[in-house]
Image (cartoon, rainbow, N blue to C red):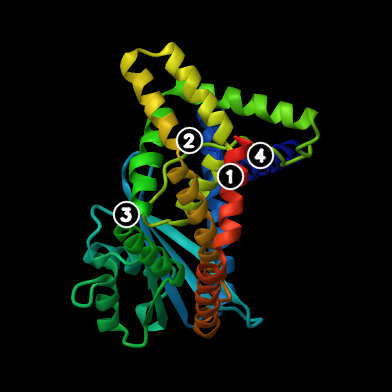
């Protein structure tokens, strides 16, 4: 019995570590795999039991979203937002279910089945939170409207940060300079360099060389978590913060990217060599440096608002105040930011 308990505790600890790392657990044999599945299911049940006890039969809000998993199956996740016995606002994942399609009726059925599984009902719902898709917040047949029919007290809130993201996307698409930066420069760069493992490796090598040189010259500090490898992942329209990260990474990797493009041009055929040269000319243009730094300054202000809006304890009053502060900072940049902006550009171009 003692040996079995020791093995069980070791298995639980191993699975716990793998789950925290986001890694799958595969046993050495079918018996061990079956044991691991039983342990994971038991942990899930105990976690859900603790959440329900923490809710103490009170009211709650539902937060739902959908995404395709690695096997391209649509999964809907449901989170509960509630006030616990200590008066603290909590958000907890209740579960995920496979859905055949992404219609509002399917989502409603999936949410209802999850709630019923844990003896919860729509009558306890006092809030809803989804993204801006029509199947979610459509005024006639959206998920929001369907749940309001059953529970009129379920007030709907469109995520503040998501509203900001959609606003920025819409405005950026109407601005020719911003569109040129992302569509005509960054998108071709990301597709060209990121479209081949060999080209990615060129960038990794140049980046590693730059870090070693900077460390030897004392321009960088060494230590745990510092000087991590940066990549050129593709941005997402509904996550405008990803555009901010891309520009920061491109400017940070600027010399490494130029050297990589030179190397790619030397070893590639005529077509890819011409593409590499064209990208180099765009990146070395005044227009690119000017617009990229301008976007960094603007996103630096709006990204602070974006992060603040995603805090769990955020409320509408504070949100409106932060929007006002952001508008003031943007206006201040417009009125007084020209000289400092040009100094940044001049310094950057002189350095590279």
Instruction: Indicate which label's residue lies in the foreground, 3 or 1.
Output: 3
Q: Is residue 179 visible?
A: yes
In the image: residue 64, left or right of residue 211: left
**Counting residues from the N terminus, which is met first, the one under dot 1 or under dot 4?**
4
**Counting residues from the N terminus, which is met first, the one under dot 2 or under dot 3?**
3
Give the alpha-carbon distance from disc 3 to disc 1, as whole Å.
Answer: 45 Å
**Counting residues from the N terminus, which is met first, the one under dot 3 or under dot 1?**
1
Q: Is residue 201 above or below residue 17?
A: above
Give the alpha-carbon distance from disc 1 to disc 4, as whole Å.
Answer: 9 Å
Which element type, helix, strand or loop, lies under badge 3? helix
The answer to whether the residues at label 3 and label 4 have Cβ atoms under 8 Å apart is: no
Estimate the x, y position of residue 243 in percent, counting from the top left.
Answer: 45, 51
Q: Which mark is residue 85?
A: none
Instruction: Indicate which label's residue lies in the foreground, 3 or 4.
Output: 3
Instruction: Indicate which label's residue lies in the foreground, 1 or 4.
Output: 1
Q: Which mark is residue 19?
A: 1
Residue highlighted by disc 2: 284
Estimate the x, y position of residue 244 in percent, counting from the top left.
Answer: 50, 52
**Counting residues from the N terminus, which is met first, the one under dot 2 or under dot 4?**
4
Q: Is residue 117 visible?
A: no
Residue that sits furthest to the bottom in the current view: 153
* Residue appearing at x 42%, y 56% in the figure: 239
The answer to whether the residues at label 3 and label 1 have Cβ atoms under 8 Å apart is: no
Q: Which mark is residue 176?
A: 3
Give the alpha-carbon distance from disc 2 to disc 1, as whole Å.
Answer: 45 Å
Which element type, helix, strand or loop, lies under badge 2? loop
Residue highlighted by disc 4: 14
Q: Is residue 88 above or below residue 184?
A: below
């Amino acid at each position: 019995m003692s040996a079995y308990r020791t093995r069980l505790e070791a298995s639980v600890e191993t699975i716990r570590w793998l789950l925290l790392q986001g890694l799958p657990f595969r046993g050495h044999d079918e018996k061990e795999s079956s044991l691991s599945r039983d342990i994971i299911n038991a942990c899930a049940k105990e976690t859900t039991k603790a959440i329900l006890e923490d809710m103490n039969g009170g009211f709650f809000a539902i937060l739902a979203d959908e995404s395709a998993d690695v096997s391209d199956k649509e999964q809907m996740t449901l989170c509960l937002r509630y006030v616990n016995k200590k008066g603290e606002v909590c958000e907890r994942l209740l579960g995920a279910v496979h859905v055949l399609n992404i219609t509002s009726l399917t989502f409603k059925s999936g949410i209802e089945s999850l709630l019923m599984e844990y003896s919860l009902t729509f009558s306890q719902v006092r809030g809803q939170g989804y993204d801006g898709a029509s199947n979610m917040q459509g005024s006639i047949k959206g998920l929001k409207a369907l749940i309001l029919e059953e529970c009129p007290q379920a007030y709907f809130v469109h995520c503040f940060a998501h509203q900001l993201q959609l606003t920025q996307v819409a405005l950026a698409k109407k601005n020719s300079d911003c569109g040129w930066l992302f569509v005509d420069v960054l998108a071709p760069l990301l597709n060209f360099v990121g479209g081949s493992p060999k080209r990615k490796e060129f960038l990794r090598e140049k980046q590693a060389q730059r870090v070693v040189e900077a460390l030897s010259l004392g321009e960088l500090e060494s230590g745990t978590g510092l000087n991590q490898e940066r990549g050129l992942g593709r941005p997402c329209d509904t996550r405008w913060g990803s555009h901010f990260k891309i520009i920061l990474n491109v400017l940070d990797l600027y010399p490494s990217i130029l050297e990589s493009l030179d190397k790619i041009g030397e070893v590639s055929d005529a077509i890819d060599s011409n593409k590499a040269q064209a990208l180099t000319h765009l990146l070395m243009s005044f227009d690119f440096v000017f617009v990229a730094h301008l976007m960094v300054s603007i996103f630096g202000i709006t990204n602070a608002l974006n992060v603040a809006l995603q805090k769990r304890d955020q409320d509408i009053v504070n949100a409106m105040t932060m929007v006002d502060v952001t508008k003031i900072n943007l206006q201040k940049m417009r009125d007084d930011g020209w000289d400092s902006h040009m100094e940044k550009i001049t310094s950057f171009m002189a350095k590279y």
